[in-house]
Image (spheres, grey):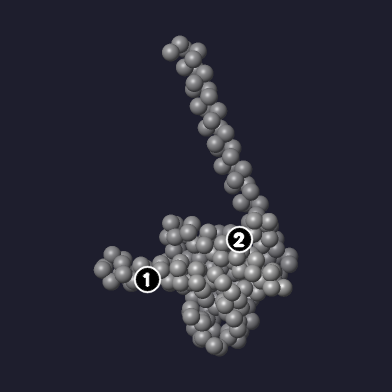
Amino acid sequence: MSHNAEKTKKIIAFKQKLEKRAEELRSELKELQATLEAVNAILLEKGFKRAEIGKASAETETWPPREESAAEPFAMQVPTENENVVPLTTVSGELLAILYVGEDSLQVLPAEDKNFDVNTPPFTSFLVERVLAKMKEKDNELARTGQIPPEKIFSYTITREGDIIREIIIRNVDQTRLRELKSSIRWTLEKMHEKLKSQS
């Protein structure tokens, strides 16, 4: 191969590398803009509320939910320094919920104007039974065989007022599961939202 041909090949490879990086930056910018919009919504529209830290265990309900509803009102909080804020939106850009992603935890906070009912499919049949419960079941087996310590078992808590979901807290989440959970939660809430819209 001639010197010029080799030089051209290197330039083409460098161009492809630049194009790939530019696409990554565009994607990152888009995500940052969506996150900024979500934070603005929290601060300006009071569209989201976070559960108070340190609430009594009687005020939170682990799936399946009990008949009692949480008595204390929810209070908005700003994410802590170690949390990432990830908006979950519909294909059209409508905000469904905010994810607060910690080091090994995940908090799902639905938009206040989205009254997601625990009885609306596919919340129980898909998200709870096929995703959350299965992950917990797998970790229980890993702990039983000594592959992970008991304190690292995947767990989740669903807090509600009546049948309306106010918060989902998921603990002991690794990066692989985080990607699956974000996708599953977004899909579930979008399907629930579509059903609620069709009923209104």
Q: Which residue is mark 1?
A: 137
Q: Amino acid at mark 2?
A: Leu
Asked if 61 appears above or below 122 in the picture, the reply is below
Between 13 and 121, the one nearer to me in the picture: 121
Callout 1: SS = helix
- In percent of width and height, residue 121 lies at 56, 72
- Reading the image, the residue beneath label 2 is 88
Tell me the residue at 59%/42% (across/down): 25
Q: Please say if 198 is above or below 63.
A: above
Identify which residue, 200 or 13, lies in the foreground.
Answer: 200
Mark 1 and mark 2 in contact? Answer it, CB < 8 Å: no
Inspect this view and state whether residue 52 appears.
Answer: no
Q: Tell which residue pokes out farthest to the left in this image.
A: 145
Q: Residue at x 41, y 67 (%)?
A: 135
Which residue corresponds to the image point at 51% horizontal and 82% vertical from the top-left?
65
Residue found at the far bottom of this picture: 68
**Dot 2: within a 10 Å radius of its alpha carbon, few (fewer than 14), some, or many (20 or more) residues?**
many
Q: Position of residue 15 (x, y in %)?
A: 55, 28
